[in-house]
Amino acid sequence: MKKIAIGLLCLVVISGLFFLYISWQNQQETQETKPSYETTKVMKEDLKVFIYAKGQIIQGENSWPDYKEYAAEVLVDELDITKVKKDQTVDIHVTALPDKTLTGKITSIDQNGIISGDVTQYKVSVMLDDESQLMANMHVTADILVDEQKDALTLLKQAVHTDDQKKKFVYLPTKNGKVRVFVETGAYNDKKIQITSGLKENETVIVADKK
């Protein structure tokens, strides 16, 4: 009788260990086969759109009522010039003054353009708020603010895709993989794009498959 009891106990222990092993193996297989993605969140923030241009410091016009010794003159590509308007805000970075960012506003836009090969650029003049430490012909780069969307839903640009019908879409992670969701977009800069329809704030979106 004792031998039978010991035999049954051993059988129970072996069965339990076998069940634990099978459960562990299934868990490992599930972890190995479950898709892994790099993700990002839909954010609500102010989205600023800039045009970037290069140029130099020039002598100011010194005309009444604004007497300015210096101004900035930058060249804007023909593909961007239609977005540039008088009085738009500009951040000016002077190569010789790396720790200083100047601000200003556009005062004039040349209508003739300068042709160089297959490219046409247009001179844009910027009146500066601060002229200290400037000298003529210093090299500058300009960030021209051409659009700003307040409290916009934004997403990393690389998370938004385009199909053959030119429709925008994103991938959302699911328990077993991912699902495609079509979206509508608005303004964008070099990093972020505005989502006008299709997603909500804080939704998780796939950027890429993890390697």
Image (tube, rainbow, N blue to C red):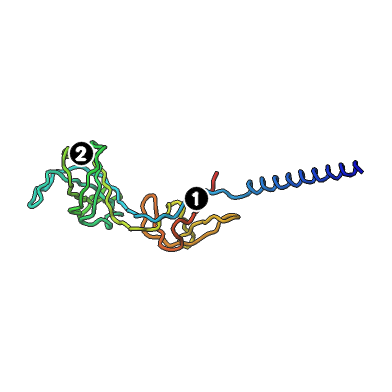
Quarter holding the N terminus is: top right
Residue 45 point in image, percent of width and height: 37, 54
Circle 2 sits in a helix, a strand or a loop, which is it?
loop
Q: Amino acid at mark 1?
A: Thr
Identify which residue, 143 or 124, lies in the foreground. Answer: 143
**Side of 86 where 211 appears, left or right:** right
Instruction: Identify the residue position indicated by label 2 in the image.
Output: 138
Quadrant of res 18: top right
Identify which residue, 125 or 8, lies in the foreground. Answer: 8
**Side of 78 where 42 appears, left or right:** right
Q: Residue at x 48, y 56 (%)?
A: 203
Residue 22 point in image, percent of width and height: 73, 46
Instruction: Identify the residue position indicated by label 1 in the image.
Output: 39
Residue 100 point in image, percent of width and height: 24, 40
Q: Earlier in the sequence, mark 1 or mark 2?
A: 1
Quadrant of res 82: bottom left
Q: Residue at x 16, y 46 (%)?
A: 71
- Per the model, the C-alpha gap separating discs 1 and 2 is 43 Å
Q: Amino acid at mark 2?
A: Met
Q: Nearer the viewer, mark 1 or mark 2?
A: 1
Circle 1 sits in a helix, a strand or a loop, which is it?
strand
Q: Residue at x 39, y 50 (%)?
A: 191
Mark 2, residues whose alpha carbon is within 10 Å: few (<14), some, or many (≥20)? some
**Side of 202 where 211 appears, left or right:** right
**Residue reaching furthest front?**
2
Residue 138 point in image, percent of width and height: 20, 39
Identify which residue, 109 or 38, lies in the foreground. Answer: 38
